[in-house]
Amino acid sequence: MADVSVDPPSRESPDAYAISAEFYDILQADRDRARVRRFYGRDVRVARRGVLDVGAGTGRVTLMSLADSRVPVHAVEPTRAMRSLLMTRLAALPVDVRMRVTVHPGGLAEAALREVADVGICHNTIACLHPAARRALWPAVADALVAGGVFLVQLPPDRLPPHEATHVLPAQQVGGHEYGGRMVMSADADRIRTRFDYWVRGECGVLREYTETFWMWPASRAEVIGELAGSGFVPLPERADPAVLAVGLGRR
Ligand SMILES: C[S@@+](CC[C@H](N)C(=O)[O-])C[C@H]1O[C@@H](n2cnc3c(N)ncnc32)[C@H](O)[C@@H]1O
C-alpha cells in the first residue's frame, strides 16, 4: 500500500491538555465516574439509535455508554493528548465492544455526522468553549441527532467568580509517589482563568511540578437554552442536578 500523508483536522490544537492529560484520570477519575453515571446513566441505558459524546476527553462518558448500552457510540475528541488516552482505553476493550465505537478526531462539524444518535452528551466541555465556538456547536449536534433525540449538556458556571477560589484535587498514591493538584479560578474581564497546578512528590519531596491554564466563559441556563432553541431544541423537564441541562430535538 502506498504511503499517504493526511493533514490533521484543522481545529486540532496540538498543545491543549499536554500537561493535564497525565494527571486528568488519576486526580479526577473516581469522582467523575460516579457523577457521569448519575447525570447520564439513565438516558444511555435506553438509547436505541446511538450515543454521541461531544468532547470525549479520556473517555469517561464513552466507556460508560459502551458498557451500559448496546448501540453505536460516537466519541468526538479534537485534542491529541486526550484522544491518545481514550484510544488506549478502547484498545483494551474486547473487539466486539470496540467495534461499536467510532472516534472522530476533530470538531463535531468536521465529523459531519447525520442522525447517528438519539442520545447526545456534552460533559464538562462547553464551559471551555469561547461563546462563538459554543454557539457553532449546536447546529452540528442537531444534525447528529435524530428527531426526538435527547441532548444533555453540563452547563458552564453562570457567572464570573467574585474572588479567587481554590479547589484541591485529593492527592492519590501511585507506588512510592503521591500525585496532587489544585484548580484556581479567578475572573479576568469576561472570562474565568482556570489554572491547574500539579505536583508529584516522592519520599524526599517534590519531584515534578507543572501548571496549565485554561479559559472558561460563563453562560446562564437561559442563555444556553436560547442558543439551543435556534437549532430546534426544546427544554425537557429539569434534571435532579441543576448542573445538567436536558433538551429534546423537535421534528424538522
Ligand atoms: C475538560 S475536558 C472533559 C472531557 C470529558 N468530557 C470528561 O468529562 O472527562 C474537555 C474536552 O473537550 C474537548 N474539546 C474542546 N473543544 C471542543 C470542541 N469544539 N468540540 C468537542 N470537544 C472539544 C477537549 O479536547 C477536552 O478533551
Image: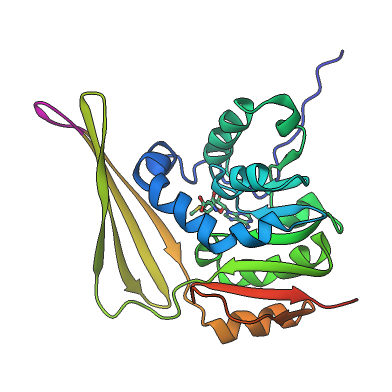
Residue lying farthest to the left in this orientation? 204
The colour scheme used to paint the residues is rainbow
Going 49% across and 42% down the picture, which residue do you hit?
15
Going 68% across and 55% down the picture, which residue do you hit?
45
The percent coordinates of residue 1 (x first, y second) are: 87, 13
Screen quadrant of the C terminus: bottom right
The percent coordinates of residue 70 (x first, y second) are: 75, 44
Camera-side residue of 43 and 147: 43
In screen coordinates, is 223 left or right of 71?
left
Question: From where the camera sits, is residue 18 visible?
Answer: yes
Q: Which residues are magenta?
A: 201-207
The percent coordinates of residue 42 (x first, y second) are: 63, 61
Q: Quadrant of residue 23?
A: top left
Residue lying farthest to the top in this orientation? 1
Going 63% across and 26% down the picture, which residue do you hit?
91
The percent coordinates of residue 12 (x first, y second) are: 62, 46
